[in-house]
Each structure stands twice: as structure tokens, then as C-alpha cells.
Image (spheres, grey):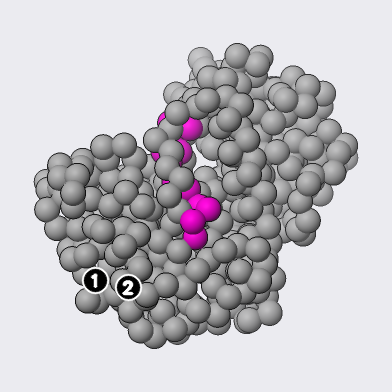
Amino acid sequence: MKVIVLGAGVIGTATAWYLAREGHEVTVVERNVGAARETSFGNGGQISVSHAEPWANPSAPWKLLKWLGREDAPLLFRLRADPHQWRWGLSFLRQCPTARSRRNMIQLLNLGTYSRASLQELRRETGIEYDSLSKGILHFYTSEKEFDNAIEPARVMRELGCQRDVIDARKAVELEPALAHIAPRIAGATYTSADESGDVYKFTTGLAARCAEQGVVFRYGVRVQRLLVEGGEMTGVEVANELGCYETLQADAYVLAMGSFSAPIGRQVGLSLDIYPAKGYSVTLPVLNESKAPSVSLTDDEFKLVFSRLGDRLRIAGTAELNGYDMSLNRLRCEAIVRRTLEVFPGFSRAELASYWTGLRPATPGNVPFIGRSRVSGLYLNTGHGTLGWTHACGSGRALALLMSGKTPDIDFSWS
């Protein structure tokens, strides 16, 4: 079968890899000059099955009220005259009750576990190097209340097969000595030894190169204009090609993997994908003092930041700003990330050496992505992964490739 994948982020590239492995003829269309140049470029680096508690949970509405008006809030909702933002916000609130939050968490755990195993298998097979570390993820809390609130979700995750252990501050510092500076402030922590970290940009570009070796064609600098549908069936994709001329591309099947931009493209053909861009920020700092820098991937609950060691760099990412498709970089939010990082790990680097990045994460109200067939015949979805695109990429791509090949994926969860 001839397949066109729209988007060469980590999701689209992983999808192309697994489709090619199933024997399909694959072309990937990407508007940038290479793979992983947008949302997949500078994320937090965690492959975090344990990061399965959805944003939409019973405590979320009260936190949002507390953060209103704070420019450095972990989740900043900039209200706009945008019906799609308001619809997304209402859907988010509907996902907050305990039963729905738990259902979403189960789906995220199942997909995450499957995806991590798929990544490990792919890594063994291809030998791709991407600064990967298999030291687990340590989630630390500097608030007694937030730590107490984390105990039940951790218990549920263990019950569902994710070994997220609750530990005290002493054990946390034993696992990551670089936390010693703030040890007196740590109320407790959770630790998932099976989780990993790594540079998603290096992984995606490496995988794209191996895809090309397997015959996958990547067309960079090609911008999707619109999906062409007749009688409820895909007939092609109109693009502005490498020369800026309009061209119609045709295939037997199409995969929409354009992240946050999947929603407006989908609306062209009557698809109502409840995806809204959540702008995230990251900072990358060089490690100047090895003894003061962390080597275990960490999550700072109070500031909603993740820290991942990528070779001789430390990547820190977090916060979410719901402000439409605005891509301007808010230095205030970036500088807040640097301040917190040097407060937790003083002396490992210098603030003036920080490099900043921002990207739009395709968030669904319950954090569960859209994977599978759409209502338009011939059009498949692999989008809406929010903050977990790196975590879920291999599992999503593998599962979708199997579905498109008429096979049943080795995973039991309900597609969103």
C-alpha cells in the first residue's frame, strides 16, 4: 500500500518506520528543512511511563484558579476570543472527575508501557545513539500536601503494572546526590526505575536516516495546504512543494501526524479533533561542574519542570501556555526556569550560557491521543500526544502501522 505521512516529528517519523517495516511504500511530507524541527526539537527528554496522571484530574480546577494572573504559572491560560480554546477548556473540565481521570490514566499507562518496550526493541535493532539513559525518573515534592496527593496515584499505577515507588528524602538523595542542596525541603518523592531519558531530536533524525535507508521518501520544505475529499473518501493532499508550486499528492492511505496543526487541517474535512496547542518552554545548559549536576532524570512537582541529562548538557523543560498558535518566546518564563534550576543545582552551570526554546504541544483535554482510523475513509490519525509525544511515539507508530496492515496491535486500550 502507498502511504503518505503528513509530518516528520517524532510521531510521523516513527509511524513511517513501522509502516515501512510492514512492507508499505511510504512518503513523509514535512514543511521544515528536516525532521524534528518543531515540537520534537527541544522537549524535556523523558520517556516517562510514570507521567501518566492526566493534567485533567480532580485537583486541577483549584490549581488553575490559584495560578490565574501569574505570568510564571506552570499552566497559564491566556483567555482569547477563540471558540476552539473555550471548547477545549470546557472539555478539560469535563475530564477532571475521578472516574474519567482514572480511565485516561489507564490508557496512558498502557500506551506508555507498550511504547517504551517498542523503543527499547527499536534501539537494539538499529543502534541509534541519542544520549539515552536508563536510570529511571525521580519525581520530587517540596510540598507536603502535593506529596500526600501523589501517594494514591502512585498506588494506582503500581496496581496497573507501573512500579512507581514512594520514597523519602533520604532515599531520593541517595538515588540522585545532586539533590543534597535542597534535601531539607524535600517532603518526599516517587521513583520509577524502568523509565528512561534521551534526546528526541537526535533520535528522530537518526530514525529518519534509517527510514530513508529502508526506502522511505522524505520531502522537506513541502507545506500541506488542504486535504482533498470526495464522497467521504480521501482523494489526495494539496501541497505547496519544494519550489513553492501547488501539487496534488495521491496515495492509498494518509496519516495525519501534524501535531497541533492537525486540528485546523482536520476541520477542513469535517473532523472535530479536540486538540489545542499548549506552548511549552525548555532551557538547555552546559554542565560545567559534573559533581553538582544531576544524572538521573527528575521531575520537580512544585514548578512542573523536568530535568534530563543529555551527555554534557542538562535539558530543563516545562510549563504550558494556552495562547493559540503564538510562537513568541516569553523570556520571563524561560528565566524563571533557569532561576529554579540553579536554585536546585547551584554551581553546575551559569545562567548566561542558557539556550531557550519553545514549541507547541498538541494537547487533548484528557491527554489521550487520537490514534487510528478517522471518519474520512483512507485518512488515519496519529496526533494529540501533548507532553508525551516522545514517550508514546514508538508505541503509537507501531500500533497504527499494524492497524493499517489489517493486524491487531499487542496492546489493550481504547483509542481516543
The disc placed on residue 59 is none
Q: Quadrant of residue 190?
A: bottom left
153 with respect to 77 (left or right): right
Which amino acid type is shown beneath numbered disc 2?
Answer: Ala
Which of 395 and 295 lies nearest the eye of the viewer? 295
Say whether marks 1 and 2 touch (CB < 8 Å).
yes
Residue 197 magenta? yes
400 with respect to 333 (left or right): right
Residue at x 32% of width, y 49% of height: 295
* Camera sees residue 218: no
Which of 222 and 114 lies nearest the eye of the viewer? 114
Instruction: Give coordinates of residue 339: x percent, y percent.
Output: 18, 60
Q: Secondary structure at mark 1?
A: helix
The disc placed on residue 169 is 2
Mark 1 or mark 2: whose residue is earlier in sequence: 2
| Start-end of magenta stretch | 192-203
Q: Is residue 139 above or below residue 287?
A: below
Instruction: Give coordinates of residue 366: x percent, y percent.
Output: 61, 66
Residue at x 70% of width, y 38% of height: 398
Instruction: Report which residue position mark 1 lands on.
Output: 183
CA–CA distance in space, label 1 to label 2: 6 Å
Residue 393 magenta? no
Q: Quadrant of the C terminus?
A: bottom right
14 with respect to 402 (left or right): left
Q: Quadrant of the N terminus?
A: top right
Residue at x 74% of width, y 42% of height: 399
Q: Is residue 414 above or below residue 217?
A: below
Which amino acid type is shown beneath numbered disc 1?
Answer: Ala
Q: Quadrant of residue 285?
A: top left
Count numbered badges in the picture: 2
Instruction: Give coordinates of residue 187: x percent, y percent.
Output: 33, 79
